Image (cartoon, helix red, strand yellow):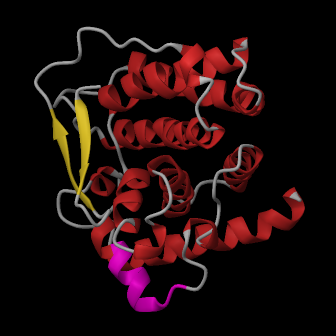
């Protein structure tokens, strides 16, 4: 990727840095990756989960991608393949990671987490899910949680913002819970956030220049707070049925 995310020392989001060229080579040894804690693979899936929804939002709004160009059908196809791969192979890949084994499903998910997600977001763009992640870093309780875990919850917030159909929300909830990704505020360290904290998170997420404004409709602090609460409610309602 030609983009890096930079944080302050206290864990709050600082900025995205876009570089002038991509790496000459990205080498991933899946035998090494399989020895890592399974939570890291799941967090990578949480980050990759947002790719297709953010790509669709950017394409719908005809906004510039991360390189300043237009989204292409190829970019959207890569994002769609990323999502399908997660749905089909995510659970199997996580089982393999727990066994420290390299399986075809594990290989495909590593490809989705790196190549498909990386090309998909750079070539189409980011939208609400990653902005919500950035906003969540303003809440100290979220800091023990990984980037991809907060992006996964941010994806649910984006779906709420976009008023997506229930079938799509349920599909994302089923996938997320199947691989241990958070679907509620409690699961990212915010069991009972008060209104001022939610407004601070939403204000950071909707700050000028944030990618949440790539959504094809106006976004305000108030609409982000409402979407966070709606996403949390959907997750809480889903968890008993998932259990």
Q: Is residue 59 above or below residue 120?
A: below
> Would residue 136 be found to the left or right of residue 179 on screen?
left
Q: Residue at x 71, y 52 (%)?
A: 173
Quarter occupied by residue 104? top right
Q: Is residue 119 above or below residue 46?
A: above
Closer to the camera in the image, 212 or 41:
41
| Residue 5 in view of the camera | yes
Quarter occupied by residue 232? bottom right
Closer to the camera in the image, 31 or 172:
31
Q: Residue furthest left?
A: 20
Q: Residue at x 69, y 29 (%)?
A: 97
> Would residue 192 be found to the left or right of residue 154 on screen?
right
Closer to the camera in the image, 55 or 149:
149
- The quadrant in which the C terminus is found is bottom right
Q: Residue at x 74, y 51 (%)?
A: 177
Q: Position of residue 73 (x, y in %)?
A: 41, 19
Q: Which residues are magenta?
A: 193-202
Q: Is residue 204 above or below residue 53?
A: below
Q: Residue at x 51, y 28 (%)?
A: 113
Q: Position of residue 233 (x, y in %)?
A: 67, 74
| Residue 65 in view of the camera | no
> Would residue 104 be found to the left or right of residue 32 on screen?
right
- Residue 80 part of the magenta-drawn span: no
- Residue 194 part of the magenta-drawn span: yes
- Which secondary structure class fits the magenta region best? helix
Q: Position of residue 179 (x, y in %)?
A: 71, 43
Q: Position of residue 43 (x, y in %)?
A: 55, 43
- The quadrant in which the N terminus is found is top left
Q: Is residue 120 above or below residue 137?
A: above
Number of marks drawn: 0
């Amino acid at each position: 990727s030609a983009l890096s995310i930079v944080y302050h020392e206290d864990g709050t989001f600082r900025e995205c840095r876009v570089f002038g060229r991509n790496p000459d080579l990205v080498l991933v040894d899946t035998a090494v990756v399989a020895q890592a804690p399974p939570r890291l693979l799941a967090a990578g899936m949480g980050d990759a989960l947002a790719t297709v929804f953010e790509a669709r939002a950017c394409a719908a709004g005809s906004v510039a991608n991360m390189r300043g160009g237009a989204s292409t059908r190829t970019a959207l196809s890569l994002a769609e393949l990323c999502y399908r791969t997660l749905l089909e192979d995510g659970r199997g890949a996580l089982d393999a990671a727990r066994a420290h084994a390299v399986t075809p499903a594990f290989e495909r998910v590593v490809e989705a987490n790196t190549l498909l997600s990386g090309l998909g977001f750079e070539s189409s763009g980011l939208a609400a899910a990653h902005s919500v992640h950035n906003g969540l870093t303003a809440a100290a309780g979220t800091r023990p949680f990984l980037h991809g875990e907060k992006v996964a919850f941010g994806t649910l917030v984006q779906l709420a913002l976009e008023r997506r159909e229930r079938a799509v929300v349920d599909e994302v909830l089923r996938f997320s819970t199947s691989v241990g990704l958070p679907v509620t505020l409690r699961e990212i360290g915010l069991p009972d956030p008060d209104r001022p904290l939610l407004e601070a998170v939403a204000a950071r997420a909707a700050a000028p220049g944030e990618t949440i404004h790539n959504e094809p409709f106006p976004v305000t602090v108030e609409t982000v707070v409402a979407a966070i609460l709606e996403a949390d409610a959907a997750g809480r309602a889903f968890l008993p049925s998932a259990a």
